[in-house]
Amino acid sequence: MSEESIAVTHPFLDLAPLSADRFASIEDRVARLLGTEQDVVIMQGEALLPLEGAIRSASGPGTTALNVITGPYGQTFGNWLRDCGATVIDLPVPFHTAVTADRVRQAFAEHPEIDFVSLVHAEAATGNTNPVAEIGEVIREHGALFYLDAVASIAAEPVLPDAWGVDLCVIGAQKAMGGPAGVSAVSVSERAWARMAANPRAPRRSYLSLLDWKERWIDGGRTALLHAPAQLEMLALEACVERIEADGLDAVMARHAAAAAATRAGVRALGGGLEPYVHEASEAAPVATTLRVPSGVVASELVARALAADPSLPLAAGGGALAKEMIRVNHYGVDATRSAVRACLGALGSALGEQGLDVDVQGALRAVESAWR
Ligand SMILES: *Cc1c(COP(=O)(O)O)cnc(C)c1O
């Protein structure tokens, strides 16, 4: 009888199991990235898992939630909150702008019973970013629990849950971190743990449960995992945090800020009726720049033409109804580079030119060069 063997080895296969120690050390690294002393739980799914899990854990029929809507994720959070039985006060903000701390202050004045605030920091889908530090101050004055979606801001701009008083801060690695989409993390304050523990409806013995991780992982000294972890994604997350540490978080954020500034400057110089979708640069997210197409042009068609020339460009049309009017330049992660921004503007310029619009591609490329810092 011949000795049995596996024909080929493969870098993704036949790995030793991920130990609890290794898992805990990846959590600690993510905590350092967030500059937080809070507990950090790495959840074994895409960021929607901790986003939904945190809402279901911390809210219920007794909750009055202020839900800020600056894009599609805010809509989703409101729906989850209502599903949990919370009273939801939606604060919708036009997608070309950001919410202000004053609007939040005004909401508390009208509804002093608000005890939960959900906010998206930056929205890759609409290209805006919100002033979290100032909003956090208002929320703290009123003692409400602060839930923040920082998936699109982490590594593109500062995310400081402790300094800003964020109680539940969710991140994913698939945007500016340049990492995997299959695992994600949430930092949890003591106040948030207490709110969950007091919530009879908080999921337990459930994939959505944060309390399971608290009681069975954290309180047990992080020695035994709840279930087999998503090993490949955990290793990819570790590698991606390592790479950010090597480059320096500040340098990674600076690259995203430069990509956003260069895209805005390039678009203004390009002409052809294309404009930054978010009016104020200070309200535009460093992770991605959204553009408004001129009337008579359909954004999804323009993007299709640009991608036909080069399918690797980080371009997309807006989602849903925005597909007509919005283009997204997703200059994040590996695409937070001058060459990606140049290529996107060149391709959009050519596509607009083909439609008979007057564009200055060379001018746009010069503007990219001078705006990049
Ligand atoms: C990208 C993103 C997520 C995660 O959603 P995916 O589409 O699955 O990547 C969550 N929240 C915000 C604000 C995002 O931009």
Image (cartoon, helix red, strand yellow):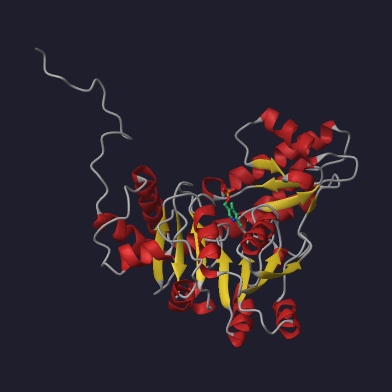
Q: Position of residue 110 (x, y in %)?
A: 76, 83
Q: Where is the C terminus found, in terms of image quarters? A: bottom right
Q: Is residue 365 left or right of residue 52?
A: right
Nearer to me, 141 or 195: 195
Q: Is residue 233 above or below residue 192?
A: above
| Residue 333 image offset from top left, x and y in percent | 52, 49
Q: Residue at x 65, y 40 (%)?
A: 343
Going by the picture, which residue comes out furthest to the left? 1
The x, y position of residue 209, in whole percent, is 44, 60
The front one of 189 and 25 is 189
In the figure, is residue 136 to the left or right of 240? right
Towards the viewer: 50 or 238: 50
Residue 160 visible in the picture: no
Q: Position of residue 271 (x, y in %)?
A: 83, 47
User: Is 119 placed above or below 350 here?
Assistant: below
Please name the residue shown 38% across and 57% down the image. 246
Query: Where is the N terminus found, in terms of image quarters?
Result: top left
Q: Quadrant of residue 223?
A: bottom left
Question: Which of the two residues, 37 or 348, is positioned nearer the viewer here?
Answer: 37
Report how many numbered discs are placed on residues in the image.
0
User: With 254 as the anchor, is 17 left or right in this view?
Assistant: left
- Residue drawn at x 30%, y 60% is 24
- Kindly tell me whether residue 291 is visible in this rendering: yes
